[in-house]
Amino acid sequence: MKIRIRVPATIAAALACITVARGAHAQPGTPPGDDPVILIHAGRLFDSERGVMLQNRDILIRGTRIEQVGAGLPVPAGAREIDLRNRTVLPGLIDAHTHLLQSIRPTLRDTETEQMVVQAVMEGTPLRALRGGARAGAYLRAGFTTVRDLGNSGRFGDAALATAIREGSVDGPRMFFSGPGLSPEGGQYVGVLAEHPEIVGNDYRIIRGADDGRAAVREAANRGARVIKVYADNTPNRARLSADELRAVVDEARRSGLPVAAHATSDDAIRQAVEAGVTTVEHAYDASDSTFRLMASRGVAYVPTETSAAILDRALELVAPAGERPDSAWRASYLARGYDRIRRAMQAGVTIVAGSDFYQDFGMPQGEASRQMLFAYRQAGMPAARVLQAATINAARALGDDRLGAIKPGAYADLIAVDGDPVADFEAVGRVRFVMKNGKVYVDGENAPIR
């Protein structure tokens, strides 16, 4: 039985006026007069679009947006002033490859699948989302004001966390989430028996044909996904999507206005993903020079999920007693392979986008661990300014939102401040002392959260 409630015309008219007013409030460039006004005085400001450091700039913020940037801006009546003259102000950092709802122990042995299965069937999506909220807070305190979260989140547990952050129930970065990754048979759950497809289906959307790939994109879009995650191949499985399936996924994503992030490790799978028109390639472990050149020519960005020396050493401490750890030659070779990929991609002219892929518990706040991937890029020889661009403007462009990744009029008021000049001394990136997202201050001082 359907129940219909008639609303008197006078009430309906009032509701319409409220709706119009709310819509007008949301329009960029027309903030109401009662929005809070903040003027930040920055000793140094990183211009991410040009990759240069500017001296003595002021940033005028009204509500959630930056209104003006310049030197010696007048202080509006009633404005709050924030003095960061002894610090460097940067756009809020962006990690373009996170898994907030997943955390397993580092391992040198093939136990990841077992840990992931236990997490899926014994934690469940609600508990994973709650724990993901704690990790989200750690990312924000570390200076990441935006993340692109790429699956391994149950059946849209990432959507629930993104909603909680957006409405203010949970502190965290804004999330561009994908929902379950679109995958060939088996997902990344190696060895799960075929009679238990529900285990694999908890974290992956298995694609069976081009039409099914299109349907999967529509499902994700319907749940509010801001990006599509697709597995061009599976690691360590050998399963791959076909060229037709990849093209169908990309074409449908474009129809929905969504970028596509492709997990691709083998050279053939990387080329196939690039030719299908994906936005970014994640990992690219076996990419050849010619494939990197193809990525550059097609405008496909690269997300190198590499490990810094400090994180590798921390992982080895956690997984093996001193007498069982790999020797220094293994360590050097491991790091060198990752650094070589980054250097070859840069030489080919590929745009680098920062992404950590840290879903492991290193015994430290996950945001701090993820920030270490920036040091990996620097250790690979990437100039400091380009590393900062990878984690700001380049990542924003990969996400498809020009309101992110830069300190300019119209951009979101997403800012961090660090002690020192990270272009001259990259260690300063680790000294985050101020974090603002959407015009709200979350950290002010010695990395202390605002309560």
Image (cartoon, rainbow, N blue to C red):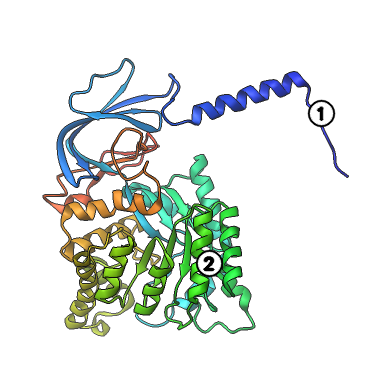
Q: Which residue is mark 2?
A: 248
- Residue at position x 55%, y 63% in the image: 154
Which type of secondary structure does the marked residue at label 2 adopt? helix
Residue 357 versus residue 21 in the image, above or below: below
Residue 214 in sight: yes
Is 47 drawn above or below residue 287 in the view shown? above
Is there a contact, CB below 8 Å, between mark 1 and mark 2?
Answer: no
Label 1 neighbourhood size at 10 Å, few (<14), some (14-19), many (20+)?
Answer: few
Provide residue 440's location: percent of width, then percent of height.
Answer: 38, 34
Rendered location of residue 206, percent (x, y): 57, 72
Could you say which quadrant of the image residue 382 lies in? bottom left
Q: Nearer the viewer, residue 203 or 295?
A: 295
Q: Residue 427's x, y, as percent? A: 17, 53
User: Would you say 322 lies left or right of 192 here?
Assistant: left
Farthest residue in the right direction? 1
User: Measuring 31% from the left and 47% from the top, which residue is drawn there?
Assistant: 143
- Placement of 266 over or under 24, stated as above or below: below
Residue ID for mark 1? 6
Quarter holding the C terminus is top left
Give the residue furthest to the left: 424
Picture residue at 34% right of the left edge, 62% below the top? 300
Q: Earlier in the sequence, mark 1 or mark 2?
A: 1
